[in-house]
Image: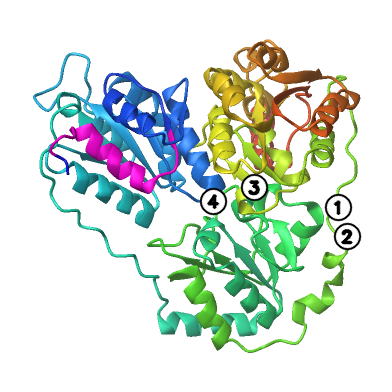
Amino acid sequence: MTEHLNVSDVVADVCARHAEAVFGLMGNGNAFFTANLTARGLPYVSARHEAGTVAMADAYYRASGKAAVATVTYGAGFTNSLTALTEAAKARIPMVLVVGEAPSTGPRPWDIDQLTVARGLGVATLTVAAGNAERLTEEAWSTARSERRPVIVSIPYDLSNEAAGPQEPAVLQQPVKRMEPEPAAVGRVADLLNRAKRPLILAGNGAVISGAAPALVELGDKIGALFATSVMARKSLDTPWDLGIAGGFARTAPLHLMRSADLVLVAGASLNAFQTRYGSLFADDAEVIQIDELDDATNPRVSCFVRADARETALRLTAAVAAVDGGWRSLQPEITAPSFGADRPGNEFAADGRLNPRAVAQQLDEILPAERTIVQDGGHFCGWIPMYCQAPDPQGLMMVGTAFQSIGLGIPAAVGAAVGRPDRMTVLIAGDGGALMALADLESAVRTIRSGVMVVFNDAAYGAEIHQYAARGLDDTAMQIPEVDFSAVGMALGAQGVKARCLNDLQALKDWVAAGADGLFVLDVAVTQSEVADYMRESMAPILAADASAAARMERG
């Protein structure tokens, strides 16, 4: 019965049927909606900045696989959320964002055209009214899940407390069927696999989402293939023949094998510049086959594209290919050895006396519990943890901000991850620039995270800019940051912490873990600016070489 409910109540009722968590910041435009959810006892986490609400819901899904509600008010509340919303849209994260909207009678002086703004981000908006609030909110949830994207439900301000009245019946969308491959495409790819001498199967996050991992392993076992994954699909393949992460985070020995493959079957991976190691991941003569539900191949190196579901295609390929006895695997027994791809201990200090981030990452891998959810903010520092720290499964390592090339979403994302997986320790990895940007929600992290560590790789700079632009001779004044002690900031808000200037200082973290790891521990690590992550060095090599060549030509001229 809806005759005694207002429009906000109806939207809240639908959201309560679909979600187990709400992340929000209350304002005039969403007050009635938010109060309905909190009054009924639905778990609610209040952010301190609107970007945090969406980042929390995003990370909650990445950690738990469950879609959540985010909610903000109209106007400035809505615009404050846009960076996190764009990241969620580009990363294909399902959620429903309930926002306030200008009155249905027309905009006020401070209102903006939120529908046009959202459309520019690639996010659909459903604006509810009396009579259709239930139908449109149900549609939002169905679309968010079936199409894996955020959807906005907008409540005009003058209708938020209006009687909802009788509701139009909800029309639920039919489950989307898996996209099956064309038989001719299966035959063409099977012929290529049968001819390959050194096949490599590269699984991405799309393969994880579609449940394709077991089918890909079965296919690889039949043709004697080796495997690799994108960083988001790490630990998704149950096989001893997994070379680990491909692309910018690949280790030297596995990378050598990846580059020697004569055929690479890519399932559900984007093949962006970073994932392909700026074009150097594949041998020049390697056949590259991509399986994806997108309209076209995502990289010019793809020589054969199959538009289909990864799992369905892998099953059909397994039935179509000829079995190989040993094959490439018989020549590579060392990849099952514990020493294969192992890391040598990094030097503790750089030449400037500050810590080497490689050594810090290796120590963290030993200190922190194996059952962990690693939340990485964006920035130069993101090169260390994926290479040197283990994650228990694909959900155990998330890279927030990378889809939109953003920094500053890590702290609220850690909150969402902790709510999504309270059984695991939450490990936030941030840089000093991104941490300063997101400080508003450090209080949220202290308040919400039951057991977590915030690690700040503090080089007193915007490290990515230092290594991309100061390295090319640009003045670095705007790239430097006066050093902040984030452990002191955290302790002022109720966390524990320490400023680490040598590896022995990590003993405080060890003691905290041994004592039960209760609450949030902020570890501020004074790292050097001089150490460049492998992925950054490789991306900059051709640029620096071109600069040097241009300078030489100018001197000769």
Point out the stretch of residues depicted in magenta. Answer: 3-22
**Amino acid type, callout 3:** Gly
Between the residue at mark 2 and the residue at mark 3, the CA separation in whole angstroms equals 22 Å
Q: Which residue is mark 3?
A: 396
| Gap between marks 4 and 1 measured at Cα | 26 Å
Q: Residues within 10 Å of mark 2 (few under 14, many from 20)?
A: few
Q: Which residue is pictured at 25% across the width and 44% down the height?
A: 137
Three-letter residue code for mark 1: Ala
Q: Which residue is mark 4?
A: 272
Can residue 278 be spotted in the picture?
no
Alpha carbon of mark 1 to alpha carbon of mark 3: how far?
Answer: 21 Å
Res 225 → quadrant: bottom right
| Residue to which mark 2 is pinned | 338
Label 4: how many residues lie within 10 Å, few (<14), some (14-19) or many (20+)? few
Q: Which mark is residue 342?
A: 1
Q: Residue at x 16, y 41 (%)?
A: 2
| Mark-to-mark CA distance, 3 and 4 | 22 Å
